[in-house]
Amino acid sequence: MSSFARTDTSIVGRWWWTVDRWSLAALALLIGVGILLVLAASPAVAERIGTNSFYFIQRQAIYLPIALVVMFTVSLLSPRDVRRLAVMGFLASILLLAVTPWLGAEIKGARRWLALGPLSLQPSEFVKPTFAVVAAWMFSEQRATETFPGNIISIGLFGLVVGLLLLQPDFGMTLVVTAVWFTQFFMAGLPMFYVVGLCGLGIGMMIGGYLLLPHVASRVDRFLDPSSGDTYQVSNALEAFMNGGLFGVGPGEGRVKDHLPDAHADFIFAVAGEEFGLIACLGIVMLFAFVVLRGFGRMLQERDLFVVLASVGLLAQFGLQALINMGSNLRLMPAKGMTLPFISYGGSSLLALALGMGMMLALTRRRYGAGGMI
Amino acid sequence: MIRRRKTSSHRKPLPPVALRHGRIEMEGTAKQAIETGRTRLVIAGAIFALAFATVGARLIDLAILTDGNEPRIAHSPAIERFTTERADIRDRNGELLATSLITASLYADPALVLDVDEAARDLAMVLPELSEASIRAKLSTTGRFVWLRRNLTPRQVYDVNRLGLPGLAFQREERRVYPHGSLASHILGFTNIDNRGLTGVERKFDDILIGGSGPLDLSLDMRVQYILEEELAAAQQEFSAIGAAGIVMDVVTGEVLAMASLPGFDPNHPIDGADDTRFNRATLGVYEMGSTFKIFTTAMALDAGTVTMRGGYDATNPIRVARFTISDFHAKKRWLSVPEIFMYSSNIGAAKMALDVGSEGQQAFLRGLGLLTPSSIELPEVGAPMIPSPWREINTMTVSFGHGVAVSPVQLASAVSTVVNGGLAVPATILKRAPNDPIPLRRAVSAETSENMRRLLRLVVTEGTGKNAEAQGYLVGGKTGTAEKLGAGGGYQRRALLSSFVGAFPMNDPRYVVLAVLDEPKGTKATHGYATGGWVAAPVVGKVVTRMASVIGVNPLDENAPEIREAFAVELNPRGTTLASY
């Protein structure tokens, strides 16, 4: 591995010695697991919708190298360049997000996708990581310079993002963005009075969503009382975990992928549970937990507030997405469409995650001597 | 360490005056901010760790701790619904009346069919009722699902499977089957393609049948049902009637042993027949019944005590009220005793009897017999009776001989049961009563009146208008009824009759009421052109009684035995010298 000498001062050499190699290894492992699981789950789905068996695998094979390059390149950046990249990315994705309701293709009742030639792009995926970094910058700037209205700007941007997400509509994404933003605000020293108040507001909005939005109410009802409606996907997913047991039924032997329309995306964790068993699933959970908690741990030593807030935001987004996906599969929470980071099939999701984790890796690099933002 | 020295050094230099002060303050704020951040980072980290631990615990719970004996194959509610069969319907002897058969329906996924021409040719060979062209058209569609044929026989399934064609598959289905065809079709009703009851018992007991709690036993006796339908159909054809209805009812329990409405339909193919074939004349149709109502008028007068069996009324002249004239069909133009009024079916006598009891008493008595409220029989198709409102004196008179009030045949059968069974009203039912089930009984007529009515009903068959209903040895008693139907214009039509006979047997201890109604029968040479109840309906009852008695175990009696003659002795004309032999 260490083909770079300690004394190597090239960009890559410096990168290798300063980047968090444990996190890098964990992410690489996740991507490997993802390749394996998309290989296992997607042919059944592809055959069912009547395309080439390897359709999803081929598409993933196009996105994956791009994602790896993006992640590596971004992780080379300095914190300041990360910030610049995030601001530009944020502005671009907000712009795309704003035009999606008019130019986007309608899929399953929502407009979330922009067609770009042969590829399609989901702007909201890119809003998540870039907004986390921008919000972190605003919060840290407020603390650094009392006269700078960072909090106000952050709140305004948050309102804009949430408004655009709800236009699509995309409640799952809204939930994640809100939770991440709130976590950052909390870390940035939001007075406890507001913490409690905003938590209350959040709960109030969830109840409001339940009362006012029929499809939200239906999902929650089906979660609380499975017999009240169609729980086809989740019931099948649960069966899959029970079928799999400790060691799984073996690669390719699973049956859940024949029944679940989203076996290659939102319900890929169930396929893992059936074919590879409990131990493999626990391994996946631990990989996610490792990335998130190790990142958090490293931030305990970090002295730059912007780096702390941005890294925590990116990690929280990554972890939350994994938790929501796995929680939905395991019926720990109402079913919510969300990809399992680096494992589910999905081009936009993969690229956005590569961008986010690339920024995280860049921010968590050890900065000997040079320090903070120079 | 090294990094500490450089913290916040990236800030742009502040204006010189505030330089020192500002830097120190900033250092302090930043430090405080980072401290708060760290504390809260630990909290956030703990929450995340807890959440991941929960996911892990749930995984272990599902994969290992969940009971291994649980079915491992998915059982979604949709599949379970499919496996429950709709319960059978049986008659009182366990004869199967309606059942569900599992069938297979053939469908295709056109995308998987390799050679459309070959598939169409082969399929048309084993399923000759499908044309090759239509199969080819179906298999050439772009969809992923197309029905080829519903409800195949096992033999056909085997033949199709033997073809070994890819892209074909079977869907397990259920089909409701009525082995007796059109027999009792109006009682059973029928279901739609999804096996939900649409009419009759299938509709009324839909929830119970779906619940699958064992077969549903009806009160019907299919042997009697067959006899009734056969005799009714024969009479309908002989007299060219547009319809017919009949009921056989147990007078003690109210159970309906047989009930028919003609023309009927085949519940296996309910929509093949004309619309009116699905109309249940026995329960949904309400008709002016005519003279059979004199049973109730006479029983009412005897019960009220306004006249006795030895009393009578002058029937010399027709009664003129307003623009109506009430006259007798078999006019004797003299004083008539109560038995004579009943036997000769005198409208004048009946009207006078009713007038003496009064309108209030008449309504109360008829209500007691259940003639003014819809029947309680467990069918969705139950007609509400049409009763006069207001109930004037003229109505009292017309109702006494069955005009101006319309009831359903099943109401009539129930009321006659009450009159002959000792005077107890019992609700009509289509369900088999369990042997120890308490039967809700209510006294409506005195036992003595009931006894007298049996004599009078027997008299009609031995001496009066109902001679054609006689069934040797079974002591049939009854009453004829011939009503002119209301025309479209509102007036009564002389040629459109509703002719009926309601009988009971054996009259010394009645067990069954038998009712036959013919709608618009035409007289024949054999009946000298008459189409009255005595000529067209009474023979049906006589034949049904003769045939069913041996089937259900009623032994014939010697009609000339002294004790029988004694039991039915009636003093016909107390003022004259005639004494009826019995």
Image (cartoon, rainbow, N blue to C red):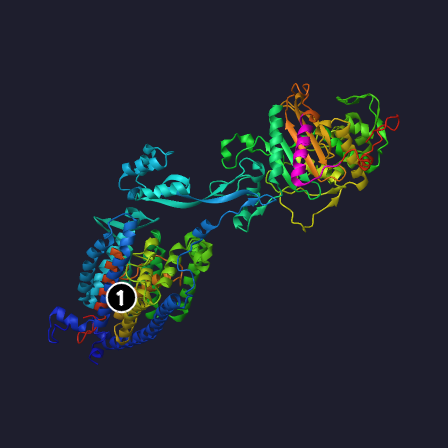
Residue ID for mark 1: A137
Residue at (65, 43) in percent of width and height: B429
Residue B46, image x and y in percent?
Answer: 35, 73
Q: In the displayed structure, does residue A355 sit left or right of residue B547? A: left
The answer to whether any part of residue B304 appears in the image is yes
Residue B226, image x and y in percent?
Answer: 60, 35
Q: Nearer the viewer, residue B72 or A228?
A: B72
Q: Is residue B386 magenta?
A: no
- The image quadrant that residue A288 belongs to is bottom left
- The image quadrant that residue B473 belongs to is top right
Q: In the displayed structure, does residue A130 sit left or right of residue B171? A: left
A264 to B341, vertically: above or below: below
Magenta segment's dominant SS is helix
B368 to B327, vertically: above or below: below
Q: Nearer the viewer, residue A72 or B335?
A: B335
Question: What is the magenta range?
Answer: B536-557
Chain assignment, label 1: A
Identity, as a three-letter code, of the amino acid under mark 1: Trp
Residue B313, image x and y in percent?
Answer: 84, 27
Residue at (49, 40) in percent of width and height: B192
Q: Is residue B551 magenta?
A: yes
- The image quadrant that residue B16 belongs to is bottom left
Residue B487, image x and y in percent?
Answer: 64, 23
Q: In the displayed structure, does residue A266 sit left or right of residue B403? A: left
The answer to whether any part of residue B196 appears in the image is no
